[in-house]
Image (spheres, grey):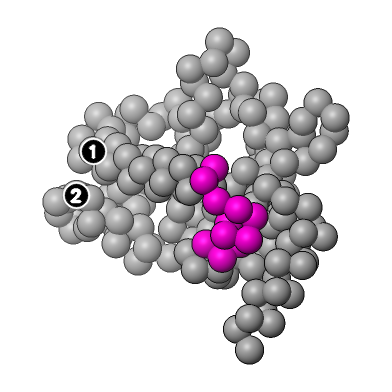
Amino acid sequence: MKEILLKYLARFTTLSEKEQGAILDEIATQEYKKGTIFLRQGDIPTKCYFVLNGCVRQYSIDEKGKEVTSQFYTEEQAIVNLGQHKPNHSSAYFLACLEDCTLVVGNLDTVSDMFSKYAQLETMSRKMLEENLGEIQDEFASFIASTPEERYKTALQKRPHLIDRVPQHQLASYLGMTPESLSRIKKRTSANQT
């Protein structure tokens, strides 16, 4: 699993092998069982995460009590809570493991210490965040402009592994449709491919 982190350090920094090793020694990983909720809507986040293995669902519960899935995080994706701009800093989302997960866990209170020690880590984090936000912007623009069937086909093309890894009702919520609509679209798409 450390190879994944080394890949990101090499991609976004010019740190020496010795510095990379020291950073890896300071990074904490944590294993979570399937079903674990490690952040609740309304909690004040104290940690950030990077998925080494597994699938994490980001969702909220609306005023009617309905769960709305807004993201799935899988291998090599960062989970950053950007709610620091809110007056109470509370999370708008739940984060829950859909599978057994191994995550890098960073403490938000000590992240600036790591940045001070290894200045390139701050640059790496910024570059990863910029890349992430660019992808999210593109996904959001595409989501708004597309039909439910187009959203499903985009998911098949860009994130095919999600189709079999997440429950259909959660995938439907993520794609902005009912489970019944998703079922019909999957059937149509499958029939068109044969």
Image-quadrant location for residue 69: top right
Q: Give whichever of discs 2 and 1 has the lower sequence position.
A: 2
Q: Position of residue 87 (x, y in %)?
A: 56, 10
At a point 60% along the width and 83% down the height, the residue shown is 193
The amino acid on which the numbered mark 2 sits, given as a three-letter code, is Thr
Residue 147 drawn in magenta:
yes
User: Which quadrant does the C terminus fall into?
Assistant: bottom right
Q: Which mark is residue 13?
A: 2
| Relative depth, front residue between 104 and 194 | 194
As measured in the structure, the alpha-carbon distance from the residue carrying label 2 to the one carrying label 1 is: 8 Å
Camera sees residue 76? yes
Badge 1: few (under 14), some or many (20 or more) residues near its Cα, within 10 Å? some
**Residue on which disc 1 sits:** 123
User: Which quadrant does the N terminus fall into?
Assistant: bottom left
Q: Position of residue 109 (x, y in %)?
A: 45, 26
Badge 2: few (under 14), some or many (20 or more) residues near its Cα, within 10 Å? some
Please identify the residue farthest to the bottom as the structure is shown. Answer: 194
* Residues rendered magenta in the picture: 144-155
Q: Is residue 71 left or right of residue 105?
A: right
At a point 29% along the width and 37% down the height, the residue shown is 126
Q: Are marks 2 and 1 in contact (CB under 8 Å)?
A: yes
Q: Position of residue 189 (x, y in %)?
A: 65, 74
User: Tag 2's secondary structure?
Assistant: loop
